[in-house]
Image: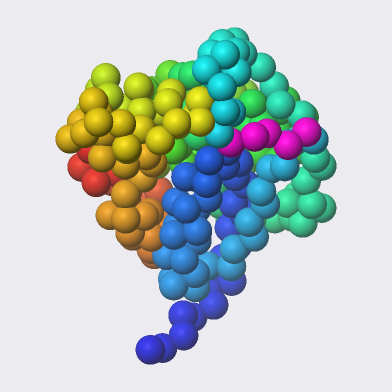
Amino acid sequence: MEAPTDTGTNVLVVSYSFSSQTNNLVQALCSGLEKEGMCIVWERLVPVQSLRFPVGTVSGTVRMMLETFLRKRIPIEPLAPVSFDHYDLLILAGPTWSYNPSGPVLSLIDRDGQRLFRDKFVLPLISCRGYWRVHWWGLKFLLRRCGAMVPNVMVFSHPNPEPWRTIGVFLKLAGGIPEKKSWLAGKYRKYGHTTMQIKEARLFGKMIGKELAEGGTELHLLNFDTTIARP
């Protein structure tokens, strides 16, 4: 197999992952980008106080859902200096928390948004249970307020149908194993994203890489709204 040609195109990926679902998507996305010769820097957001997954209790899960609905910020460690270098594209990846961007991502935007995103093309990647639109609209507003250009969005939603998807995620956060609940049998297959969705993320990476190699002027035309990503 031929090695990918280094195009000299630099991509910064900034991500936060609570349950590893976002990490799985980002790893695949970066693999696709690298196959098209993109140079990747991946910066993971690290909370000052580590967050436990699963939360482990029903009361703790309810409290977390309320706090995230109210857009509570989660302080994060400083970014590596390399994050503020020049990049041809920034990808901001993270989960939906109660209809909103995660607390670490909100802290990032508050603290570093102007410096990190101003006059940059930023492509969000959202990992969610299913209710992603409010997250997307709010995130786009915040990024544009920082001076970013936001041409498109990638959204990956859990493939289980409602209301079982919401019930399953709640049980998982509370420390349960929803896949093994007899009353959920046949309704809730698996927590998180599927193997097909991970492959789709890799394909999206290749699509983005090819577009960047050709100048990156038509990122807004890339079609990420597929039945695999958003079943």
Q: Quadrant of the N terminus?
A: bottom left
Residue sitting at the far bottom: 1
- Specify whether 40 is left or right of 74: left
Q: Is residue 99 visible?
A: yes
In the rendered image, which quarter is residue 179 located in?
top left
Image location (x, y in percent) of residue 10: 60, 62
SS assignment for the magenta stretch, majority: loop
Q: Residue at x 59, y 51 (%)?
A: 13
Q: Is residue 65 visible?
A: no
Image location (x, y in percent) of residue 33: 46, 64
Image location (x, y in percent) of residue 83: 73, 51
Q: With respect to residue 161, does 87 lie above or below?
A: below
Q: Residue at x 47, y 45 (%)?
A: 21
Q: Quadrant of the C terminus?
A: top left
Q: Residue at x 58, y 36 (%)?
A: 53
Count the marks: how many? 0
Image location (x, y in percent) of residue 68: 58, 17
Q: With respect to residue 23, does 144 lie above or below?
A: above
Q: With respect to residue 126, does 81 lie above or below?
A: below
* Magenta region: 49-53
Q: Residue at x 67, y 52 (%)?
A: 43
**Nearer-the-camera pick, 178 or 155:** 178
